[in-house]
């Protein structure tokens, strides 16, 4: 059902420092910060040859990233995103197996303008999983 790894998202306490470390130390192609108010994050996309890295920084007071950074003050991997062809079919199949879909269960439009869903970390080895329809 899942296809390519679309991105790995890393929550960071200092967006400028994280961007500098990917750009200057690791030599990656680092984009400009983008505010995503619907998701409570500011994002920097890093394009790698085979996938993307997203640096996430809290935006607004009820950002979903803030609690994660409180528990992980140095930052850390927040979620991984797999591609699917049909997000509603994927969701229904997951629900049939007893996996938990976060939120309303209806896809939201993600940072790339495509429908996304998040799956409960306790069902996937402690990792928050995002599905994105491509
Ligand atoms: Co993501």
Image (spheres, grey):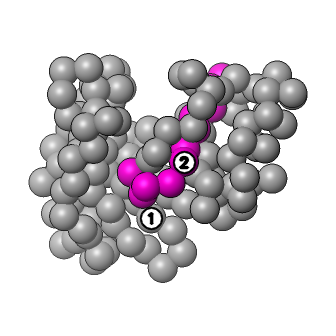
Task: Residue 15: give x, y in percent of width and height.
Answer: 18, 49
When the figure is inspected, residue 35 is found, relative to residue 23, above or below; the finding is: above
Dot 1 alpha-carbon crowd within 10 angstroms: few under 14, some 14 to 19, many 20 or more = some
Task: Residue 13: give x, y in percent of width and height.
Answer: 20, 38
Q: Secondary structure at mark 1?
A: strand
Precedes in sequence: disc 1 or disc 2: 1
Count of all numbered marks drawn on residues in the image: 2
Q: Secondary structure at mark 2?
A: strand
Side of 132 relative to 52 (left or right): right
Q: Residue furthest left?
A: 16
- Estimate the spatial distance between the alpha carbons at disc 1 and disc 2, rounded to whole Å: 17 Å
Picture quarter containing residue 74? top left
When the figure is inspected, residue 45 is found, relative to residue 117, above or below; the finding is: below
Picture quarter containing residue 44? bottom left
Task: Residue 130: give x, y in percent of width and height.
Answer: 57, 42
Residue under the point 50% across and 54% down = 114
Q: Is there CB contact under 8 Å for labels 1 and 2? A: no
Residue under the point 57% across and 38% down = 107
Tell which tag, 1 or 2, sits nearer the viewer. 2
Please check the rendered image and state whether residue 55 is part of the magenta-colored stretch, yes or no.
no
Dot 2 alpha-carbon crowd within 10 angstroms: few under 14, some 14 to 19, many 20 or more = some
- The dot on residue 52 is 1
Residue under the point 60% across and 62% down = 134
What's the magenta region?
Answer: 111-122
In the picture of the structure, the residue carrying the numbered disc 2 is 115
């Amino acid at each position: 059902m899942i296809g390519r790894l679309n991105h790995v998202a890393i929550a960071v306490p200092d967006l400028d420092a994280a961007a500098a470390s990917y750009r200057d130390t690791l030599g990656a192609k680092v984009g400009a910060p983008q505010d995503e108010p619907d998701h409570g994050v500011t994002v920097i996309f890093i394009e790698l040859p085979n996938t993307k890295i997203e640096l996430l920084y809290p935006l607004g007071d009820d950002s979903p990233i803030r609690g994660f950074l409180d528990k992980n003050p140095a930052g850390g991997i927040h979620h991984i995103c797999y591609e699917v062809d049909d997000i509603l079919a994927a969701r229904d199949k997951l629900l049939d197996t007893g996996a938990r879909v976060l939120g309303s269960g209806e896809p939201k439009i993600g940072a790339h303008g495509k429908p996304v869903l998040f799956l409960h970390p306790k069902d996937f080895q402690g990792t928050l999983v995002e599905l994105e329809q491509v």
